[in-house]
Every structure is written in structure tokens, then in C-alpha cells.
Amino acid sequence: MTVDEHVTVIRDGRLRAAGIRRGSVIAYDWGFSEGGVEHVQRTYLLLDEHLQIDQPVAFPPEQRGWWYCDLVAVDTSGSPVVRTEDRWIDVIVGPPDHPYRLLDLDEYAAALADGRLGAAEAAEGLTRMQHFLDRRLNRRHDTTRTWPDFPPREVEELRTLELPRDWALSG
């Protein structure tokens, strides 16, 4: 049995949120206000894949329940503090009968071209994204309309877990 560990996630240097780490997945809640409405968003960080995924509460009604996946840089050296930084490439995953949508490769290329992203880091990010797509979403010769492993089983186990409601947004 995996023991849950309390962690703090610092996301893009702007969000600090308390969360729970179970194995290679961290779950944390955070909130924001939009149009005068308060929202609480649950996010999952897949540490081994360097992906951060959630079902955006601000998606339009016809896309409720869809997933947004961000490639991120992850720094766990400050354990129990985990830092993430967005790495531009995103994937929107709807129901299995819809294709997934890969976004922002142009922003990734711009970051590489202007030096915000080094060649080795860019290669690692592309490799991680390809492994994520192949493992979780790509249906090689499968005739059934299901995602091979999405959402990940480890995330499903954390969806109903009571999490600390402790976050702060800056800037």
C-alpha cells in the first residue's frame, strides 16, 4: 500500500497549493474567481510523465468532463515542495469518440528559437509528450473507441480524495 505524503505545489511561480502525493501522482485543489463566480479546480501532476492534467471547471458546458493536459517541467529537489513550470505543449482530451487535440507547438518552437528552452530540454519535452500520447491516448490498431489508459488509473483513485483546501495565488 502506498502512503500518502503531504506536499506543496508551486505552479509557474504564481500558485502555491497544498496537495497529496500518492506514488508518482500529486493531486491538489486550487481556486480562482471568474465573472464573479468562485471556482475550485482539482489538478493532478503525473511526476514521471511531467504532465499536469485537470478537467477545467471553466470549460464551456458542452466540454464539461473533458481533460486539459499540460507538459510541465518538474522540480522535486525541494521535497516536500514540488515546483512546476508550463512547457507550452497542451492536449485537450474529450470523450473517446472524439480525437484528442494537440495545442501550442508553435509556442514551444518560439521558446526554443528565442532561448527560453534549450535544445536538450526541448528534445526531452517532445520525447515525454510522445510517450504520453503513445501510452495514454494513441490507438494503434484498436477498433474500440476507448482511450488505452486515460484518465490514468492512479488519477481515478485520487478523484474523490479529501484534499487540503489551502492555496494562494500571486500576481
Image (spheres, rainbow, N blue to C red):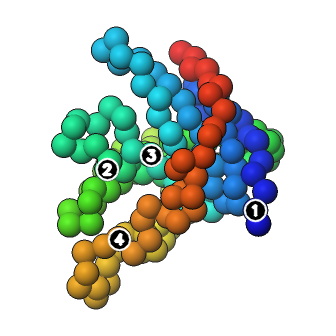
In percent of width and height, residue 171 lies at 53, 15
Indicate the secondary structure of the residue bearing disc 2: loop
* Label whose residue precedes the other's in the sequence (3 or 1): 1
Q: Mark 3 to mark 1: distance in Å?
A: 22 Å
- Amino acid type, mark 2: Trp
| Residue 147: numbered disc | 4
Left/right placement of residue 149 relative to residue 171 reads: left
* Label whose residue precedes the other's in the sequence (2 or 4): 2
Look at mark 1 in the image and give the residue it sits on. 2
Mark 2 is surrounded, within 10 Å at the Cα level, by few (under 14), some (14 to 19) or many (20 or more) other residues, namely: some
Q: Nearer the viewer, residue 79 or 12?
A: 79
Mark 4 is surrounded, within 10 Å at the Cα level, by few (under 14), some (14 to 19) or many (20 or more) other residues, namely: many
Mark 1 is surrounded, within 10 Å at the Cα level, by few (under 14), some (14 to 19) or many (20 or more) other residues, namely: few
Residue shown at 62%/28% (left/top)?
Answer: 165
Q: Is residue 2 visible?
A: yes
Left/right placement of residue 108 relative to residue 80 reads: left
| Residue 14: numbered disc | none
- Amino acid type, mark 4: Trp
> Pointers 1 and 4 in contact (CB under 8 A)?
no
Indicate the secondary structure of the residue bearing disc 4: loop
Which quadrant of the view contains residue 36? top left
* Label whose residue precedes the other's in the sequence (4 or 3): 3
Q: Mark 1 to mark 4: distance in Å?
A: 26 Å
Look at mark 3 in the image and give the residue it sits on. 54
In percent of width and height, residue 154 lies at 57, 62
Image height of 16 relative to 84, above or below: above
Residue shown at 47%/29% (left/top)?
Answer: 40
Residue shown at 58%/25% (left/top)?
Answer: 14
